[in-house]
């Protein structure tokens, strides 16, 4: 399970672009295919989009890696092409930003009810206020939009911005704090500490404790991730 040779294609959510592009500067053999962040709001549409990107990558890549966790079952049904598909054993991409699935688990156990924001989510206005302003208001009006978002967030008590130390964090911090004030939540900031998991996505090693290795023709299922949740 060492560092792979040849061309690596990483199919990833656009939310991770700042971190991945920073690391790709020294990795010319790595190609990254970014898919739109809005897929997270409609996970039922994700498998087809991810599958199309995987199939296209299979035409030229020596190794294909998904930059997605289970993501509300958004990758369930994706089929490995005529070669192995590497998939993170993660619930969602917050594990990437915190360094490992274990780090995310420990943080979640210590602080349940936390709504995490990353620089990419805030910059692309996929924070709660951005979703209200750019999506919900157009569909149902301001009053109903705010009510709907408060319903979505009613079990959250804390907003955390994960600072990856890439780019200008100041305006993103201000926006995250605005979200916390508006929804009456506590605000905290966590340092990503390292970009180790992002590096593993590109370089490996793809250890079985952190990655699923989907054989040619095999399909991603929810059950593949269950042992990860139960630990």
Image (cartoon, rainbow, N blue to C red):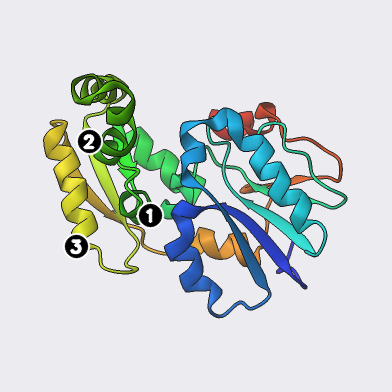
N-terminal of the two: label 3 or label 1?
1
Q: How many residues crowd around disc 3 within 10 Å: few (fewer than 14), some, or many (20 or more)?
A: few
Secondary structure type for disc 2: strand
Residue 195 in view here: no
Q: In which quarter of the image is the C terminus?
A: top right
Q: How many residues crowd around disc 1 within 10 Å: few (fewer than 14), some, or many (20 or more)?
A: some
Residue 43: horizontal and vertical position, in percent?
A: 55, 31
Residue found at x 31% / y 69%? 167
Residue 180: horizontal and vertical position, in percent?
A: 17, 39
Label pair 2/3, CB-CB below 8 angstroms: no
Secondary structure type for disc 3: helix
The label shown at residue 226 is: none
Give how far apart the Cα atoms at labels 1 and 2 are. 19 Å
Give how far apart the Cα atoms at labels 2 and 3 are. 19 Å
The label shown at residue 120 is: 1
The residue where tag 3 is placed is 170
The residue where tag 2 is placed is 158
Residue 150: horizontal and vertical position, in percent?
A: 24, 23
Q: Quadrant of the N terminus?
A: bottom right
Residue found at x 21% / y 47%? 176
Residue found at x 30% / y 42%? 127
Residue 59: horizontal and vertical position, in percent?
A: 83, 59
Give how far apart the Cα atoms at labels 3 and 1 are. 13 Å
């Amino acid at each position: 399970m060492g560092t792979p040779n040849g061309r690596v294609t990483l199919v990833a959510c656009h939310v991770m672009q700042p971190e991945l592009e920073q690391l790709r500067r020294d990795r010319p053999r790595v190609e990254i295919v970014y898919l739109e962040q809005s897929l997270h709001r409609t996970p039922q549409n994700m498998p087809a989009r991810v599958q199309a990107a995987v199939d296209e990558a299979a035409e030229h890549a020596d190794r294909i890696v998904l930059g997605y966790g289970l993501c509300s079952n958004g990758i369930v049904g994706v089929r490995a092409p005529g070669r192995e598909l590497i998939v993170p054993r993660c619930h969602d991409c917050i594990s990437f930003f915190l360094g490992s699935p274990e780090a995310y688990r420990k943080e979640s156990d210590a602080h349940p009810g936390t709504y995490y924001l990353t620089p990419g989510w805030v910059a692309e206005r996929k924070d709660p206020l951005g979703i209200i302003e750019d999506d919900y208001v157009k569909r149902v009006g301001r009053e109903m939009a705010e009510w709907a978002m408060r319903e979505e967030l009613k079990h959250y008590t804390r907003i955390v911005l994960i600072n990856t130390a890439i780019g200008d964090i100041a305006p993103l911090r201000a926006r995250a704090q605005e979200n916390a004030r508006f929804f009456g939540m506590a605000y905290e900031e966590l340092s990503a500490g390292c970009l180790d998991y992002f590096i593993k996505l590109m370089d490996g090693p793809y250890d079985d404790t952190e990655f699923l290795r989907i054989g040619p023709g095999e399909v991603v299922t929810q059950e593949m991730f269950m042992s990860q949740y139960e630990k």
